[in-house]
Amino acid sequence: MTILPQIHGVVKRLKKHIPHKKTVARAFKSMLWFSLGGVLGLFFFISFTYIIYQRAHTDKVYEGVIVNGISFGGKTRDEVKNYFLGKNQKIQSTAFTLKSQQTTASISAEQINFGYDAELLATQAMSVGRSEELLTNMSIILQAYLQNVQLPPAYKYSDQELQTVFAQLKQKVDIKPIDPLFNFEDNKVVSFRLGSDGRAVDEETLKDVILSQSRSALLSEKPQQVTIAIPVRRVPSAVAEDRANNLGIKEVVGEGTSRFLNSIENRIFNISLAATRLNGTIIKPGEVFSFNKAVGDISAFNGYRQAYVISGGKTVLGDGGGVCQVSTTLFRAALKAGLPIVERNPHAYRVSYYEAETGPGIDAAIYTPNVDLKFKNDTPNHLLIQTYIDLETQRLTFALYGTSDDREVSIGKPVVLSETPAPEPSYQDDPNMPKGQEKQIDFAAAGANVYFTRSVTKDGETKTDKYTSNYRPWQAVYLRGTKE
């Protein structure tokens, strides 16, 4: 009963110390007006400061604006522009020498008008803090003032001038790709051509290198002399080799050559005729090629002319003189291709045409129907014979096309074991030739015993063949006129 009066007394005393509700409202209102006044004051202060700062930079870059590492705060547009124009002037004599195996060209920084884009950089520097958004401008200006605003460099060049130089380079460097050609009619290839990739100036890479070197010159502020290797790119042919033919004929596997310098007209004609008839011949996998069978009858009936041949131990005029040069050249191609030689016969005596570039012993005589040249296609793909006759240099070339199986071929130099001097010249009277005139119809040649070897390595195994030639000594023969 005594506790309740005490509690009541405490409550009455607390009520005396609690502020009245009206008093709290007045205090809150005062604080609100004070805060609002502070905000408005700060706003007016910032606005006033911004207006003053903006007017001070009406035609100048704001402080803290940095272009390419250089501060341009307080600079006018023209000052920024002229600064970069001055940098450009220092490197105008920078020159580039563009080189390839086919051509050389020159170009300068002045020619392509390379340098800083002074107009653009001045515009960008002046644009910082000058958008249409007031608050955005104030934020960027403050950021530039406190932390800087970094602008990257900008460059310019004349792409038209670059393309003019590139067009000149392309005329010298570019090669169009060649599509393979293969037309097969009546068991013979009537038109053939290996495809080949072309090449073209890699313009984008070359442009990047030139511009990169030009930027380096700008950074160094010194003119430079730069040599650039012209980059090229491969231009593939539109038709793949295996789409042109499915016989595996896609590359040269063996090639043989010989020259017919100082041959008479009929001999050259016979060489061309026989070589042309072999051109386009296909040799199947496993097939033994016969020269006599492929060429056919060598006679006037088949278009051959009279030229000197070896017959009966003598050099006489006969149909098809010179065809042995064709068999000799094809023999050399088969040797270099590493093909097994089934039959090969040397000539009776040494012939200067065949020794000009190889030495003695690398020849193959034919005489239909018994003396033949034969070799086997032991590759898994077909072989194609192609002949090339250059009348200007008087050179005959045989190329065997197929698919390489990575066999390695080594042909040794001819070894002369012994030689026999040529006999004394022989003179024969010719009643149809005026008296006092002489004509050489046969040429002296020393006899020789010669051999050479050829080694073929395939699948880790090496096979060596020895080719022997026993040439008889040959006397010079002259016709001597007796006609009065």
Image: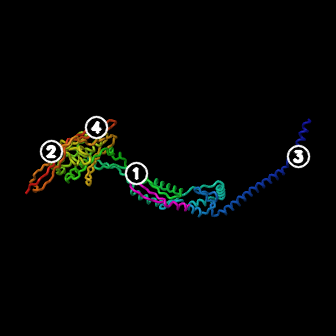
Q: Is residue 337 left or right of residue 442?
A: right
Q: Residues within 10 Å of mark 2 (few under 14, many from 20)?
A: few
Residues drawn in magenta: 84-109
Q: Residue at x 29, y 43 (%)?
A: 336
Q: Quadrant of residue 401?
A: top left
In the rendered image, residue 187, in percent from the top left (x then y), is placed at 26, 45
The residue mark sitting in front, 4 or 3, is: 4
**Residue 16 tag number:** 3
Q: Measure how far apart labels 2 and 1 are at the Cα level.
A: 58 Å
Going from the N terminus, do you reach mark 3 or mark 1 first?
3
Q: Measure how far apart labels 3 and 2 are at the Cα level.
A: 157 Å
Task: Say which quadrant the N terminus sits in.
Answer: top right
Residue denoted by label 1: 235
The residue mark sitting in front, 2 or 1, is: 2
Going from the N terminus, do you reach mark 2 or mark 1 first?
1
Residue denoted by label 4: 464
Q: Nearer the viewer, residue 439 or 389?
A: 439
Going from the N terminus, do you reach mark 2 or mark 4 first?
2
Task: Say which quadrant the C terminus sits in.
Answer: bottom left
Queried whether the magenta region covers residue 89, the answer comes back as yes
